[in-house]
Amino acid sequence: MNKFFDLHVHTTLKPMNSYSEEKGYSPVRECPDHDIWRYRPMKKESWMLDKDKDSDSKSNLNKAKTGNVKCMVLSLYPFEQGFMKLAGKKADNNKLFDKAFANMLGFDEERVNNLQDRNCNYFADLQVEYNLLKDNKLNNSQSGKWQYVLVKTYAEIENAIQENKLPIVLSIEGAAAFGLATGKYYDMEKNNPAEFEKAKIEYLQNVDKVKSWEYAPLFISPAHHFYNQVCGMAKSISADSAIAELIRPLVINQDYKLPDGRMCYDVGFTDLGKKLLEKLLQEREETINGKKVKFKRIFIDIKHLSGNARKEYFKFVEKYKTSDGKPGIPIIASHTAVNGFPTIAQAIAQKDDIKKSKFKTQITSRYGTRIDWFNRWSINLTDEEVKKIYESRGLIGFLLDETRLSNKWHLKDIHKKSKSEQKEKYMEMFFNHLFHAVGVINNIKGWDILTIGSDLDGGIDVMDCYRYKISNGKHESKGLEALSELGNDLIEFWHKQLNSSRFNNPSAKPYRKYVYDRTPEYFIEKLMWQNGMDFLKRWM
């Protein structure tokens, strides 16, 4: 394979939140670092604080070049203020906190302090990040002449690839990007309803501004890590032990109680959230100041939505079916995994905590997959949702985060192994997700909805075997370069299972069943490239 696709990367996140070596740092966001090509070295303090969420860049465009990434969906993300609080309170003037957080994520300390301001403007940050990409002139790769281009049609993608350029499709992660969801607006919702109504009008006007961008995003995930006043979100920040789970809210607290007393994990879409869905999925054209302006439809990414919000969205989207019953809107889960629960109702019936993924015995699903290897939290997809995505001709992007792909107990077993054994265990873990999704659909077309949505530079815990390489005697993240390694490893491991002495072993059965009458190469090429292209061709 020599072509790779990624449905979800955060290439601009570190440049957006760092200083410019050429121009200096501007606290009012006038001149963030425009160089999204170069590799950002790991800070020593980052390695000491958290080896899993290191500060060096993983999805810079040089790594896309050397990793043969020929098309990607870049997610714009104004960084959420909730990460900047200790026990839910502003960590202002806490220089130790600022330094630790900046080092872990590769941000500038002054930017960390700026993000703590209760008047922080997410929409302003979104526009800066968009313009950073749209207006960037430093678009020559360090590894040879290569350029990226923002694209708005599939024809533009084809042209870019033909001209040896990198086509970039945009998405947005978190509807907080349109405004709201900072300390100022939480207080306003509780204490000044009249002002909050005005803020909601401005919020929806910002949605229209984005829909009229020259390179409007293809999709947006309404929810992210913290409650954003438009919908409930799934719990996403976990701990490694019961004790750590108890003290977690003292560090980063996702818990939020709405004015009506409900918890943020239990709610669906607010009234504003329902208006947001209508506006995002609406397509229209208007004449403004004598010019025709097209307001593009923006699809919904269900990643991070609470279980109840996802159920509401599936009902909402039914009305967009065509007269002959065909899907009018694709359901997208851009960077996720499966959890093995049959339905959303079953997944949310049990609290998302460390006990949820703990099993005393091996449990095998009817698809031949290991339920006891999954992370069972409701942020991952149920069988019900896999079917919905398939029926809508949507797409599932599997991420590279080992803590989403598996649970603490299974990962402990993997980490005890030698490096060579570790890689094989990671292959089993990854195939466990692929085979489960295909098994749910129960035919060869189940492979058509699977791709990679790595979430690189999104603060994830990358599988150990794809995390680092040694470059000039130092650790350096493989990042996007790991996609080609992953693709080749999956093919090699699948062949090994088909040809091994374990052929009649029950654990080898899925490898035989889900190859159908094709080859491993056929399906892994679809996973790593073709399915993403087919999706873009169908829906752009």
Image: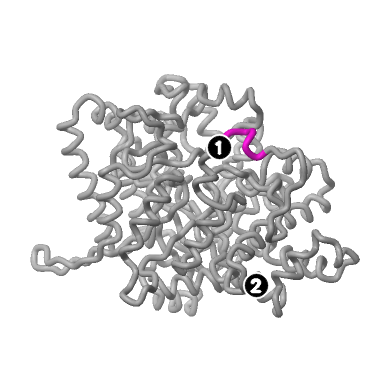
State the SS at label 2.
helix
Residue 151's image quarter?
bottom left
Give the residue at x 73% y 53%.
Answer: 364
Residue flagged by tag 1: what amino acid is it? Gln
Q: Mark 2 packing: few (<14 Cα in 10 Å), some, or many (20+)? A: many
Q: Position of residue 216 (x, y in %)?
A: 32, 61
Q: Quadrant of residue 501?
A: bottom right
- In the rendered view, does 333 fall on the left or right side of 222? right
Question: Which segment did they paint magenta?
Answer: 352-357
Q: Is residue 38 visible?
A: no
- Percent from the top left, x then y, of residue 8? 50, 56
Q: Secondary structure at mark 1?
A: loop
- The mark found on residue 350 in the picture is 1
Q: Considering only vertical position in the picture, is 139 above or below 176? A: below
| Residue appearing at x 66%, y 37% in the figure | 51
Left or right of 414: which side holds 103?
Answer: left
Q: Which kind of residue does numbered mark 2 sit on? A: Phe
* Image depth: mark 2 or mark 1 in front: 1
Looking at the rendered structure, which numbered label has been put on residue 333? none
Instruction: Point out the tag, 2 or 1, that comes first from the N-terminus.
Output: 1
The numbered mark at residue 523 is 2
